[in-house]
Amino acid sequence: MTQLRCDRTPAWGALKAAYQASGKDFDVRKAFAGDARRFDTLSQQAPHVFADLSKNRFDAETEQLLMDLARQAGVEAHRDAMFAGEAINNTEQRAVMHWLLRNPPPAIVNHVRVAIKNVAKELSDVHATLDAMLAYAQAVRLDTAITDVVNIGIGGSDLGPQMAVLALDEFVVPGKRFHFVSNVDGHELAATLKRVKPESTLFLIASKTFTTIETMTNAASAKAWFAANGGTDIARHFAALTTNVAAANAFGITTTFGFWDWVGGRYSMWSAIGLPLAIAIGAQGFREFLAGAHDMDEHFRTAPLAHNLPVRLGLLDVWYRNFHGFTSRSIAPYHSALRRVPAYLQQLEMESNGKQVDASGEALPFGTSPVLWGESGTNGQHAYFQMLHQGTDVVPVEFVAVKKPKHKLPGHHNMLLANALAQAQALMTGKLDAGGHRNFPGNRPSTFLLLDELTPTSLGALIALQEHRVFVSGSLWGINSFDQWGVELGKVLAKDIEPRLTSGDTTGLDGSTAGLLGKLRA
Ligand code: F6P
């Protein structure tokens, strides 16, 4: 695999020169005035997602240079290495194959294409597990005695299924409630347990490692509550979703659905971790969700760079982060069911690309992951959009809108879409004639993603698109997007501090931590 860090390519210098010459003062309004075809050139239909990039501070020429950058940095070879099952997660010596979870079964693949030949065994395992998990999901759906499903998991074992069950609320089986408990804060579990009964609840313990302290603490408390309230049949009321089936068994759970170390936590919603979603939307719905993502995988794997949406988005991300110096991106889903998407994308991008060294461990001389943040529209408009329009920092905004609503309330949807369009328009056009406090500088960049309808298929494609754009920027930066060493230190320190809260021992602690510990014990 031949990869070259972005700053070591000839294109990097060319982009620096282009930024100085025309990039830094680029005015999107002027670009539109000078190019009647700008919308056509800078928008595209990808599988299930239409994207308009034309309100961004670049043009076809800059995009060409960015494409050179991708080619010279070896993004294609890196992508192909991922799709060939190579161990591209080099610090953990693991393959990165969440995409395989979305691949059609081997029988179909053999007829259609041969790309999967290196991982045929893994693909059969994937489908054997998927079939078992979906059969179980169907049985739970038919089981009217189970009214509540409580998912206990955190990070990738929580955010994905939680986001997707909310997003696909219109497809959720009637008669079942879904709860997500992630925080070690007992208030969360206690509040959920108040609302459920042992005889009608299914607890799903979701943890790739089955060692995460929050999940283990919540799982133990849930199990104790179950027993204390007359529950006896653990096999019926508890299932574990994990790569560590032995640990789940040792914990006393015999109903288990496995996955593999080549599925990263934040990429795991397509595996057994997706069980809450599968119960919610059914086997057929879950297969459609996988199929939508697979369509995007195939697009990313095969489309020429210039028409490859994840590549175009990832390159734009690098253009903004490393040349314009923008440090954050705001996600604005104009659909209330997509309200947990910003939280989901935070983990996806910031845990993947929030790194300060490259894959070989060398310190990076440029910025990496932006801060991702956001709220659903129109709510954000009445909170922080003020800053987006008139603040001193430029924050690229990514709008996500859905053409067809699922409700029949008159007027609402056009109002919603009008607001999305108006915000993107206002950010770009601005308004300078009023003066002073009423001035809008404009030229504030945004991308507009549009789904025809919010369905399992389109949601799958939208999320796979985001995964692959994060792959592209991470690849250009030369980092390993698939480890997360940065979460370790806090875990270790919490273990050290916890007994001190009881003992009061402050030996070796810094002044602030010792002071706060004292306050908490007083
Ligand atoms: O602490 C970070 C992390 O390792 C995430 O990457 C992961 O999604 C989360 O914890 C949960 O891990 P697990 O599924 O093993 O409980």
Image (cartoon, grey):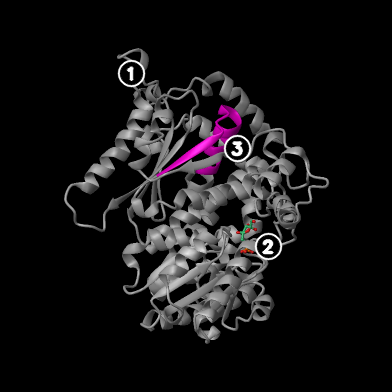
Residue at x-position 53% and y-position 55%: 302
Q: Is mark 3 within 8 Å of ligand 1?
A: no
- Say left or right for 6 vs 342: right
Give the residue pinned by disc 2: 95
Q: Is residue 323 magenta?
A: yes
Q: Nearer the viewer, residue 67 or 149?
A: 149
> Residue pushed farthest front?
522
SS assignment at label 3: helix
Q: Are marks 3 and 2 in contact (CB under 8 Å)?
A: no
Which badge, 2 or 1, comes first in the chain's sequence?
A: 2
Inter-mark Cα distance, 2 to 1: 53 Å
Which badge, 1 or 3, comes first in the chain's sequence?
A: 3
Name the mark on residue 6.
none
- Say left or right for 161 vs 422: right
Q: From which residue to which does the magenta span run?
A: 313-332
The location of residue 322, given as percent across then percent down, is 61, 32
Give the residue pinned by disc 1: 438
Answer few, some or many: residues within 10 Å of disc 2's Cα (few below 14, many 20 plus, some between 14 and 19): many
Answer few, some or many: residues within 10 Å of disc 3's Cα (few below 14, many 20 plus, some between 14 and 19): some
Give the residue pinned by disc 3: 68
SS assignment at label 2: loop
SS assignment at label 1: helix
Which badge, 3 or 2, comes first in the chain's sequence?
A: 3
Q: Nearer the viewer, residue 219 or 381?
A: 219
Answer few, some or many: residues within 10 Å of disc 1's Cα (few below 14, many 20 plus, some between 14 and 19): few
- The kind of residue tagged 1 is Arg
- The kind of residue tagged 3 is Asp
Residue at x-position 41% and y-position 58%: 459
Q: Is residue 442 above or below residue 351?
A: above
